[in-house]
Image: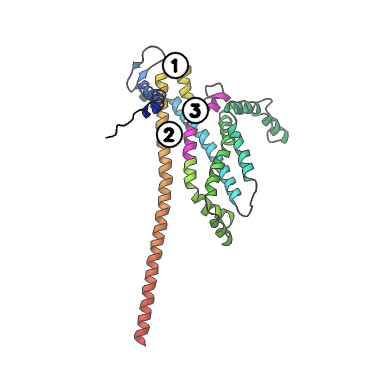
Amino acid sequence: MKKLDHKGYYFIAPFFVIFLVFNIYPVLLTFYYTFTHYEGYGAPEFIGLANYARILTDTYFLEAFVNTWKIWGLNFALQLGIALFLAALFSDLRFRIKGLGFFRAVFYLPNLITISSVAILFNIMLDWHYGSINQFLLKIGLIGEPINWLNQPFTAQVSVSLILTWMWFGYTFIVLMAGVSGISKEYYEAALIDGANRMQTFMYITLPLLKPIMLYVMITSLIGGLQLFDLPMLLTDGLGNPDGALNTMVLYLYNQAFRYNNYGYAATIAYMLFLITVVFSAITFKSMYREANGEKAAAKAKKRKSKVAKKRGNVNVQEKVAKQNTYI
């Protein structure tokens, strides 16, 4: 029997050592901290499920949860709406818009800018006294006095959502266009010949065939949205002001850990965030998957009915022929 050479394991061992030390061990240690009161120094004090009981009644965490959904929800609706509109526009055979590669690059450019640069840019543009947005709106007469965009809860949340939309709609557009490019042009040509208008083409061809891509976009956007941290942190004082309107779940986690040295509770927030992400991602996946299965079942039922009707038609024809033969 040939003896196996185990030297190959020495080459893959560094990866597994690094993965265990820097990935698995921190995850398990964080889970252990959820059962302790730990301030970053000394020995952790075991307190059982007290952190989990606290997070279920923590009004600040609930407020951060609602804020995160508000900001992400508006951002995702605008982001997906703009990307779908552009995808429909560029896939329309009636327009035949050229230079798709150029527009892809232009739309994707905001995503390449570092978030710190974006925060500085919009901090200047949204300045109450000298910001270019207020100056422009005053000049064209849309507002009578400057708006303090980042010091009012509603306008602060809307501002962050719009900035995120500006940053990410180009990425979503590229992903959707990749899905559109996989749709056969024969469908659009057939719809054009049959006289279908743009809305019908989009609703009955583009949108149904883009559902798997939209599922991917929604789940990845959901995961990223629930982890929203950097922009609210950089645009405000790090506490989520004004009035806690920009206090997201991850920002709340950050402050609990590094501002208040409450590492045990911060670890609990991290695992709660993970649980929320998994649950809502599963719900999104299941709902869209069930809808797709429902459509497939309806199509099969329709096909089955047409076969039954065809068989009945054949039977009726045979009966008529038999009657005619009898009369003859």
Instruction: Give the class, few, some or many, for how many residues have Cα within 10 Å of label 2's Cα (few <14, many ≥20).
Output: some
Q: What is the spatial separation of the Cα atoms under label 1 and label 3, in whole angstroms?
A: 18 Å
Give the structural element (helix, strand or loop) at label 2.
helix
Which is nearer the eye, 121 or 188? 188
Q: Are marks 1 and 2 in contact (CB under 8 Å)?
A: no
Farthest-out residue, front: 2
Q: Residue 323, how many percent across, how many down?
A: 35, 82
Which is nearer the eye, 7 or 245? 7
222 is within the stretch colored magenta:
yes
The disc placed on residue 323 is: none
- Quarter of the figure with the C terminus: bottom left
Q: Which residue is the site of mark 2?
A: 277
Where are the magenta residues, as a range?
218-247
- Between circles 3 and 2, the one closer to the viewer is 2
Q: Residue 165, how many percent across, how many down?
A: 57, 36
Instruction: Give the class, few, some or many, for how many residues have Cα within 10 Å of label 1's Cα (few <14, many ≥20).
Output: some
Residue at 43% across, 53% down:
295
Q: Are marks 1 and 3 in contact (CB under 8 Å)?
A: no
Q: Residue 119, how many percent across, how many down?
A: 60, 27
Sequence-earlier tag: 3 or 2: 3
Q: Which residue is the site of mark 3?
A: 248
Q: What is the spatial separation of the Cα atoms under label 1 and label 2, in whole angstroms?
A: 25 Å
Going by the numbered disc 1, the residue's amino acid type is: Asn
Residue at 59% across, 36% down:
166
Going by the numbered disc 2, the residue's amino acid type is: Thr
Q: Which residue is the site of mark 1?
A: 261
Give the structural element (helix, strand or loop) at label 3.
loop
- Above or below residue 7? Residue 214 is below
Going by the numbered disc 3, the residue's amino acid type is: Thr
Farthest-out residue, right: 139
Q: Residue 25, how many percent across, how many down?
A: 38, 23
Residue at 46% across, 16% down:
260
